[in-house]
Amino acid sequence: MFEVRVTADFAAAHFLRDYNGKCENLHGHNYKVYAHVRGEVLNEGGMLLDFTKLKAALRKVCKELDHTNLNDKEVFDQNPSAERIAMYIFHGIINELKDEGVDLSFVQGKKDPYLFAVDVFETDTSRARYSIL
């Protein structure tokens, strides 16, 4: 099994509803995001996936979030936790790449590359992961 990873970042504000603590107040993070792709089959160039395509998709999705108040985005239902952000970015990458003719969707038994996980770091020591397995 091969795995590749690319990284992007964005800065955004948010607050958490239904939370009792300092994170219920508006605050911001410099988020770091990792996108992981796995697969068993390399292309004719000996690569699992062209880093450029994966980075472009990840950066496009992160750009939509950059310098925003994440609570303003309906998709997060007023609770933009790191877990929900990771899921949003995961599905956003899939959609961006499908638009480019690259399908990284997971199918049981598939040996071709698929998006395995997205990690969202709020800080260097706090990470949430959305994964298909």
Image: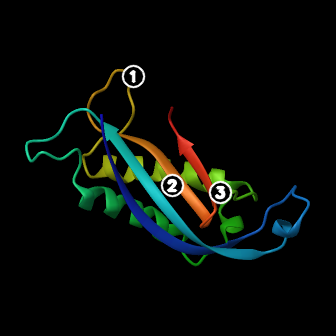
Which of the two discs, 1 and 2, labels the residue nearer the N terminus?
A: 2
* Badge 1 vs badge 3, beta-carbon distance below 8 Å: no
Residue wearing tag 2: 89
- Label drawn at residue 108: 1
Residue lying at the far front in this picture: please name it: 125
Position of residue 82 measured from the top left corner of the image (x, y, whole percent): 65, 57
Residue lying at the far bottom in this picture: please name it: 67
State how far apart marks 3 and 2 are (Cα). Answer: 10 Å
Along the line of sight, which residue is nearer the eye, 100 or 16? 16
Name the secondary structure under disc 3: helix
**Quadrant of the image occupied by residue 54:** bottom left
Height in image: 108 above or below 60?
A: above
Label 3 amino acid? Ala
Mark 2, Cα crowd under 10 Å, few <14 / some 14-19 / many 20+, is many
Height in image: 22 above or below 97?
A: below
Q: Answer left or right for 43 relative to 98.
A: left
Q: Residue at x 84, y 59 (%)?
A: 17
Q: Answer left or right for 92 relative to 107.
A: right
Mark 3, Cα crowd under 10 Å, few <14 / some 14-19 / many 20+, is some
Mark 1, Cα crowd under 10 Å, few <14 / some 14-19 / many 20+, is few
Q: Residue at x 17, y 47 (%)?
A: 47
Name the secondary structure under disc 2: helix
Position of residue 122 measured from the top left corner of the image (x, y, whole percent): 63, 65
- Label drawn at residue 82: 3
